[in-house]
Image (cartoon, grey):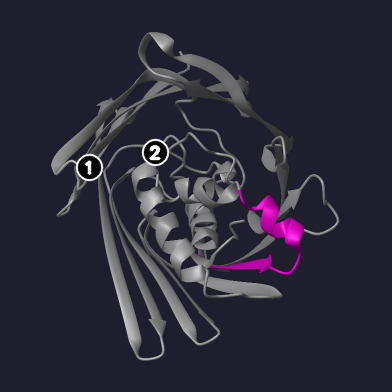
Amino acid sequence: MKRLSFIVMAAAVLSLIAACSEKNENDGVYNPKKKIAKVYESSLRISKWYDNYYDTWQSDTTVWDKALSESWTWDGDKLTKITFYETHGTGENASQEVSEVINFTYNGEQLVRFEGEDEYMTFVYDGKELKSADLYDKDHPAKPLAKFSFEHNGDKIVKIILTQDEDDEWRKGSSRNMEKVLLRTVMPDEMTVDKTVDKINKTMSKSGAKGEVSIPFTLTWSGDNVSEVSATQTMDGETSTATIHFTYDKKNNPYKDLLFGILGLFENGEAMVFSKNNVTKSVTEYIYQEGPEIERQTHEENYTYTYDGDWPTYKEQEESYEGDEYSSYRKNCTYFEYLK
C-alpha cells in the first residue's frame, strides 16, 4: 500500500501556491475571462526493448485517439461542477464512462468547499487572504488527511506549511489514489509522474515515518509568476530536497486561481494553477542524502502551445528515453474548448 510521501505532498502544495498570485481580487475567486467548457486529450506511446530470449528487439505502439476527458459546468461566473471521463480501449473499440464528478460550493464569490466521491476540501479566509485549507476523507471526517497554512509577505504568499498525519493505517489507504494524481497538479503529464512515483517508492520505502509530519515550502516570485519552489525534509538521517524551477510564456493561464488544483482529484487535467502565465519549461531537481551518500536527479519538461489570441487551445508535451536495452517515446496532447 503506497503512502503519501514527501515529494507527493510537495506536489500538492506546489499546485496551490500561485492561486493567490494577484491580490487585487479576493483569494478563492476563480473567474477567468475565458471559461473552459471541455477538455480533450490524446496520446501516443512507442516502446522498444531488447528481448534476450529471442536475441532481438521488440516494439509496441499504442495510440489513444482524441477523446473527451472533462466537461465543465458554470452558473454565470462560478464554476459549479467538473465531470471527468475515462476512456477504455483504443480506436473503434474505445468506450467512455464518467470516472469522477467534482462539485464546488461558495460563500459569496469565494470557494469554500469542493467535493468528490471519496474526499473533500474546505478553505478558510481572513478577508481577502486564504489562511488555511483542510483535506478530508469522507469515511473518516473527524480528522483531516492533510492541513495547509499560509504565510504572506505583502501581497505574496512566501511560505506554505503542510502537515500530514502518518500514523493511521486508513490514512495511508486513503492516500493511495492521491499519489499520482497529486503529482499531476505540478507535473502536468503522465510521463513525469511515472518516473517520479518510481523514485518516491524507492526512497520512501526506507522511511517508516510515524506521527505528524510538517514540511515548509519556500516560494520565489518573478512578477506574477512563481519562478521557484523548494522544500526539504529530514527523516531518520535521510534528507530529501525538491526544487522546481519554472519558465513561462506571455499568455493567459486558464487555470489561474483555481484552488481545486491542490487536491489529487484533478486526475485528467493540466492543473497548473500557479501563476498568471503558462509553464513552458519545468526543471525539477531532487537530492537524496543518506549519510555520506548523495543521489541527485534532474528532470526537464518542455511544453508547446497553440493559442487563440491570448489563450491556449492546444498543449503538447513530448518525452523520449534512450537506454542500452530500452527506449521510449511519448507524446501527450491536450485540447481546450471555451464557452462561447
Which residue lies at the image location 47% right of the left edge and 38% below the top edge? 255
- Name the residue tied to disc 1: 328
**Circle 2: is it few (<14), some (14-19), or many (20+) Cα within 10 Å?**
many
**Farthest residue, direction bottom:** 292
Do tag 2 and tag 1 residues touch (Cβ < 8 Å)?
A: no
Q: In what element is the residue under mark 1? A: strand
Disc 1 marks a residue whose amino acid type is Ser
Residue 17, how many percent across, how many down?
50, 56
Magenta stretch: give its range: 158-176
Looking at the rendering, in which quadrant would you find the C terminus?
A: top left
Which residue lies at the image location 51% right of the left edge and 59% below the top edge? 8
Front residue of 130/285: it is 285
Which residue lies at the image location 71% right of the left edge and 43% below the top edge? 119
Please tell me the numbered disc located at residue 253: 2
Asked if residue 324 lies left or right of residue 84, the reply is left
Disc 2 marks a residue whose amino acid type is Asn
Residue 295, placed above or below residue 64: below
**Circle 1: is it few (<14), some (14-19), or many (20+) Cα within 10 Å?**
some
Of the residues tagged 2 and 1, which is closer to the observer?
1
Asked if residue 276 lies left or right of residue 134, the reply is left
Front residue of 27/214: it is 214
Please tell me the numbered disc located at residue 147: none
Q: In what element is the residue under mark 2? A: loop
Residue 60, how many percent across, how many down?
25, 31
